[in-house]
Amino acid sequence: MPKAEANEGAAYTTTAIALHWLIATLIVCGFTLGLSMVGLPLSRQKLQWYAWHKWIGITVFLLSCTRLAWRWRHPPPFPLATMPNWQVRAAVVVHWLLYALLLVIPVSGWLYSSASGVQVVYLGLVPLPDLVPRDKSLAGLLQATHVALNFTLLSLVLMHAAAALKHHFVDRDAVLTRMLPAALPKQQS
């Protein structure tokens, strides 16, 4: 089976690494907050948690746009490692699906808020326009879509993490370490 050529020493840029881990942290926080807030009784705390969840989502959207722009100007250090071509293709597909979900999920949440009649006010300072008029049945559909997309993202993130760990502990290649800040040579930016 043909294999991709190794590029073991290549690491991502400092900016790419910082954006990756910042977005990953925000996703974990937003997902955890999303699961936690749903079961709360209506209260000031629940409303604050919803606001934080929305702020995290909009921030993930903005950082993902930044990450994509950065990636366009600074391609990743491909090929990934010595591995079969199907794994390289699978990694590319999963990465692009992750990027798509990082853009679509916040928009689905914004649409859901709009259809629910609750305006999104980013960081409590910037009111965002409603994307659709208030509509209870549409809100229900958008809520289900938002939840399904989030669980799809969770599945892909778990696959992504499992693959990185497999590369590190089973294949013993540099796929994981090149996304770690400690892997950076001093001249990277």
Image: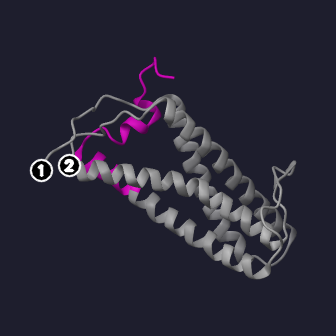
Q: Name the residue under label 1.
A: 1
* Residue bearing mark 2: 84
Residue extent of the magenta highlight: 160-189
- In the visual, does 49 lie left or right of 126? left
129 up-or-down from 72: above or below = below
Q: Which residue is drawn at 63% across and 69% down?
A: 146
Counting other residues with Cα less than 10 Å from the Cα at mark 1, is it few (<14), some (14-19), or many (20 or more)?
A: few
Residue 179 on image: x %, y %: 42, 38
| Residue 71 magenta-highlighted | no
Q: Give the dominant element type of the magenta stretch: helix, strand or loop.
A: helix
In the rendering, which numbered label is found on residue 188?
A: none
What residue is rendered at 80% in x and 73% in y?
Answer: 116
Query: Do the residues under discs 1 and 2 have CB atoms within 8 angstroms?
Result: yes
> Which residue sits at x=52%, y=42%?
20
Foreground residue among 110 and 47:
110
Mark 2 or mark 1, which is nearer the start of the sequence? 1
Under mark 1, the amino acid is Met
Question: Residue lying furthest left in this view?
Answer: 1
SS category of the residue bearing label 2: loop
